[in-house]
Image (tube, rainbow, N blue to C red):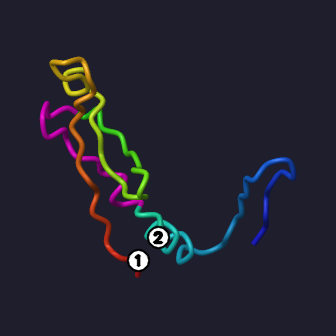
Amino acid sequence: MFPLSQRWTRELMLTMHGAHFARKLLAQLNAEVFARPPRCGRCKGASIEIRRRKNGNWYWRCYAIACKTGPTGRSDAWNRDIKLSEAR
């Protein structure tokens, strides 16, 4: 393991040898779920981004203009909670 960082930031990078660590890290970070955003349930578009609620739960949100604003001018974007499986 070789730490790579800068002392004036909170960033930390490291290199590891072996695929086991990478697989475990990707699983822990839900990479497979986050890499496959759904189509919008309203406009069927692909302008989907991932967001996090104040309670810590993740959700998908459509950013297409058609879905972003309702008839009153207020935000009415389509969104859907992301169901994550428990860490292994």
Secondary structure, magenta segment, majority class: loop
The residues colored magenta run 31-45
Q: Position of residue 63 (x, y in %)?
A: 30, 30
Residue at the (26%, 54%) spot, across then down = 81
Q: Position of residue 73 (x, y in %)?
A: 24, 17
Read off the residue under disc 2.
28
Q: Nearer the viewer, residue 33 or 51?
A: 51
Q: Element under label 1?
A: loop
Residue 11, above or below 70: below
Read off the residue under disc 1.
87
**In the drawing, does residue 5 fall left or right of residue 71?**
right
Q: CA distance from mark 1 to mark 2?
A: 6 Å
Q: Nearer the viewer, residue 6 or 17?
A: 6
Q: Position of residue 75 (x, y in %)?
A: 27, 27
Q: Amino acid at mark 2?
A: Gln
Mark 2 crowd level (few <14, some 14–19, many ≥20, 10 Å Cα): few
Is residue 15 magenta-colored?
no
Q: Element under label 2?
A: helix
Mark 1 crowd level (few <14, some 14–19, many ≥20, 10 Å Cα): few
Residue 6, above or below 63: below
Q: Amino acid at mark 1?
A: Ala
Which quadrant does the N terminus fall into?
A: bottom right
Q: Nearer the viewer, residue 63 or 17?
A: 63
Residue at the (19%, 18%) spot, across then down = 72
